[in-house]
Image (cartoon, rainbow, N blue to C red):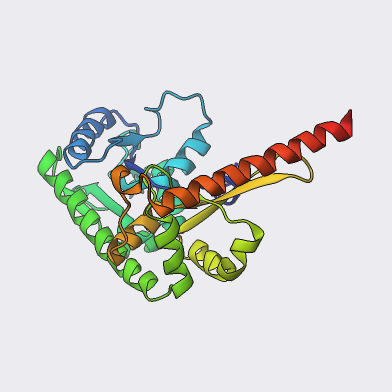
Amino acid sequence: MYTKHFIEQFWEGEQKDQLFVGMPFDGDEAWKFDVITKAAKKLNFKEGAFMQGTEKEAISIPEGIFFNIANSKMLLFDLSDDLRIPPQVSGQEYHRTNQNVMYELGVAMAIREPYEIALIRKKTGTEPRLPFDIRTININSFQDRFGSDFIEGIIKETLAKKELHRNKRIKFVRQSIDENSVMLMLAYGRIPNRNHFHLDPVQISPYKSSLLRLIDLGMIRFESSLWSPTGFEYAYHWTDFGYSVMEDLGIIKMNENDFSGSKEEKAIKQADERFMEQKKNFLDSSRASTD
């Protein structure tokens, strides 16, 4: 599958709390990945580190690579010389960086932000000339076997840059939402243990442009399910980023005690009951028409 097709059809949008690692399988990958995995766990990546070839699911290798590059919290690429490639060919210095790793880095550079990517490389006596597009990016060098302090420092620095840009993005989004968006957050963003909501045609009318704006800003995603060629259901889902913006605005989820018996709980129950009744009536009428 081509990268473009995968991104268009299967990019989930919600990040996995893991560190994606791209490195050559040249005999050094086991101890390197062990150091990186321990550093990731120490720095609270809930799903640790991931490297293609360590997964247990029976999925195609390219799709696994694309999926994890697209959806991992942070990406780390080792551009060290591949030990399986001879250092010279016909007496000339040879480019020894693993081509698969370079391809994965190219995919990452195309779809991810630069502050989400970190590059490392082992120093050698004679440094090969990397491609021009790579030479312009900061590469963190290490001597011999890198240790946990080196990797932890790289991860911390990258996460700090990511958080800085995330805060800038939150500030931008805060300045891009209107009063109807805030009303939607207050009405549907504080419900505990539930990240989705739906609005009937009458309710949705004054909020339509605001909903579309929140989708464009990455605060909401839309999901739907067809019952038949003429029947369907849908829901708007708050994203993790959406909750971060709400938190920055001071809009915090209610706890169960505050929610119980509140006007918000009453409104949600009424909406759910109305939706289930509409769905039942539709399905009953569909069955009757086919009998």
Which is more toward the observer, 89 or 128?
128
Residue 256 picture location, percent across and down: 32, 43
Residue 57 picture location, percent across and down: 46, 25
Relative to 149, 178 lies left or right: right
Relative to 286, 99 lies left or right: left
Can residue 178 be spotted in the picture?
no
Name which residue lies at 81% across and 36% down: 286
Name which residue lies at 49% across and 49% down: 268
Can residue 132 be spotted in the picture?
yes
Quarter the C terminus occupies = top right
Quick check: 81 above or below 141? above
Quarter the N terminus occupies = top right
Residue 178 picture location, percent across and down: 45, 75
Which is more toward the observer, 243 or 270?
270
Name which residue lies at 35% across and 37% down: 85
Residue 251 picture location, percent across and down: 32, 61
Residue 89, by quadrant, is top left
Furthest-left residue in view? Answer: 149
